[in-house]
Amino acid sequence: MEAPNQLIPVEDAPGEFVINVGPQHPSTHGVLHLRIKLDGEQILDIEPHLGYIHRGIEKMSESLGYKQFIYLTSRMDYLSAHMNNQACSLIVEKGLQLEIPERAKVIRLLMIELQRLASHQLWWGSAGLDMGAVSPFFFAFREREQILEIFEETCGTRLTMNYITPGGVMNDLHPSFVKTVKALIKQFKVNIHEYDKLLTGNIIFQKRTQDVGVLSKELAISLGATGPVGRASGISCDVRKLHPYDGYEKLDFKEIVMHKGDSYTRYLVRIEEMKQSMHIIDQLIDNIPEGDFRVKTKAVIRLPEGEYYQRVETARGELGVYIVSDGNKSPYRIKYRTPNFSNLGVLQYIAKGSKIGDLVAIMATLDLIIPDIDR
Amino acid sequence: MLSGLMSPGLVVVSEALIVGLSMIMLVVLMAVAMIYMERKVAGFMQLRLGPMRVGFWGSMQAFADVLKLLLKECLTPNGADKLLFSLAPFIVLVVSFLALAPFSFAPGLQMWDLNIGVLYVSAVSSIGVIGILMAGWSSNNKYSLLGAMRSGAQIVSYELSAGLSIIAIVIMCGSLSIHDIILSQGDGWWIFKGHLPAMFAFVVFVIASTAELNRAPFDLAEAEQELTAGFHTEYSGMQFAMFFLAEYTNMFIVSMIGATVFLGGWMPFHVYGFEAFNNIMDYIPSVIWFFGKTFFILFLIMWFRWTFPRMRIDQLLKLEWKYLLPLSIINIVIAAFITIMGWHF
């Protein structure tokens, strides 16, 4: 594996030129800045520049209490807010050796799978948009909107939910939750065929994504690619299967692993994951146990001295939370291993040599969330 | 009566003025109608309503947009070549107006019955690419330049197929004059009379002209998600509006060519030998036939745009040079053979 050039020289060779994609660009989905060296349409080199949306979430967390720092994590990968909250709640529960009620666990899983569904739907829409098909965006938002409405009913907000807390969840499910979720899943099982008709089976879309941005298994492992990106390259990296949490071990679902590693495979993995998420919700929605939705925790939590690590599977891959505690009311050191940062690292290897249009297709199927890269 | 009062020269000038102004009015009104139609078509394809607030069902939305663009400042970037930068939108717009001259809208209503009408339209409309290249070059923006280069490659390539597909009909008809082409369809439109070659030519024509128009799935020159807006990234206000108007005028022209050459222009739907049926069809005025057909093709082009993803530049050129062009040439040979044997009706 040859390391990419660290700095693109500003002087161009004849016929070569450098363009800046971003920080304001429609297909970077945020303030990502790529310097691209081009020879005509051909990409010779890519250099990502980060830091435009660095908010110091890790450092801020070190001066907040264990109940408070969780709120910041909703702002990292804002499409996986529930998962981020859950990772932090799990690590605090692990430190306190807190057992949470069954009902809370099931509510968490339901919310998380709904979130995964919503996230993949948004990704599907914007992937179509990136490749110039505008209509899929609206079809994706039709379903996503319903999920956000369900979140709003129960959690009070639509994007940064802060719903999952140490000890369980913030408040109980809305009375209409079961009914609306059932209706939603029933409808989406029909509507997902429209997704296939609009993009999956479209010859132009297939030509744009097949054999584009092929990520080999070796490269994916050495760069730490996880989530659908890693699984499309043949790595079994679903944390829900490998290190189950909150009761995933009791559920029947498949880990989607495909082997080709191109953009189209990454697309297919996400489509299949949506179906698996619906399957998980189907199993849980009729079996929500009665009982408390939260156990009481102390007003000020102090984790015992030591190091803690917790990983969860977000919609984009493995989120790891590492906390060093010195026994005080706020963490001594906190570090997030975010999936998008590792997945971005893949970009300059797989996009080299392809066309500008391919870069957009690769970025779309890597599904990057920029605030998660910078934190 | 007026001509008695005026000198013959003045009569010609005033006639030209009246016809020219009414043509410009027609095009502007059509552009407004097409923008409204596009937004409504897009809206209904995307589970929404489209513009609804300005006027009845949003019908005044396009006028409001034009008003806004008129009042906006036209910015010129610092490093731009000022002359070329301000000249480019004019070239693009003037060229698309020029191409309107030989069209026949109704029996007897034709500005200029040119004996090489079809050739004239395809020749003139290809000058537009110079304006696009100028815009891309003078903007001093690498995105614009990339978009302009793409557009150049695309228009030059697809012109061949668009031209060849029309030639298939010209061979069968035996004339390049738009008036003659329409009259030759009195006993049936070419798309029905010309057997398979005419249908194939129609399909190729719609594909190639969509590509010539730089519209999705061939909108690589604009490619919003790749090049932000391509060649007109740096344009604002009325200069941008001129590119926009030119795009819609070109759409209108392309649809008119398609309607005229393949679907009979203002000629009603006639079936050879069915006299009573033909008479009933004749009762429907030609304006309905002409604009009905034109808007049918317009709808096809809009349908493409809101359904398909964009192609990549190499795929785009491959489609033209490897598939459409050879097939079109074979198609012309077949069409010529059918014409020689007299197999078309």
Image (cartoon, rainbow, N blue to C red):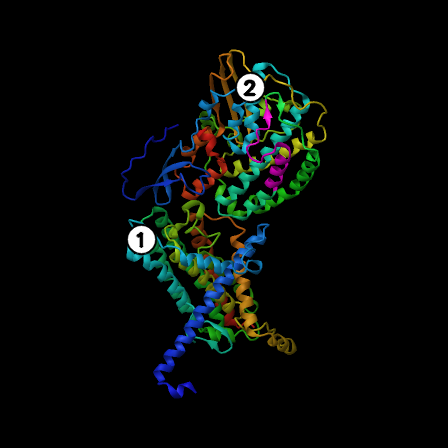
- For image coordinates 27% across by 38% down, the residue present is A11
Mark 1 = which residue? B138
x and y percentages locating residue A296 in the rendered image? 64, 18
Is residue B325 visible in the rendered image? The answer is: no
Mark 2 = which residue? A91
- The vertical placement of B17 against B227, above or below, is below
Q: In which quarter of the image is the C terminus of chain B?
A: bottom right
| Bounds of the magenta segment | A143-165
In this view, the mark in front (2 or 1):
2
x and y percentages locating residue B324 in the rendered image? 47, 56
**Gap in angstroms between the C-alphas marked 2 and 1:** 58 Å
- Left or right? Give the position of A104 relative to A12: right
Under mark 1, the amino acid is: Ser
Q: Quadrant of the N terminus of chain B?
A: bottom left
- The vertical placement of A20 against A329, above or below, is below
> Does the magenta segment cover residue A198?
no
- The vertical placement of A312 against B212, above or below, is above
- Left or right? Give the position of B279 relative to A129: right
Q: Residues within 10 Å of mark 1 (few under 14, many from 20)?
A: many
- SS for callout 1: helix
| Residue A247 vs residue A261, the one in the foreground | A247
Under mark 2, the amino acid is: Ile
| Residue B291 vs residue A39, the one in the foreground | B291
x and y percentages locating residue A332 in the rendered image? 47, 16
- Mark 1 — on which chain does it sit? B
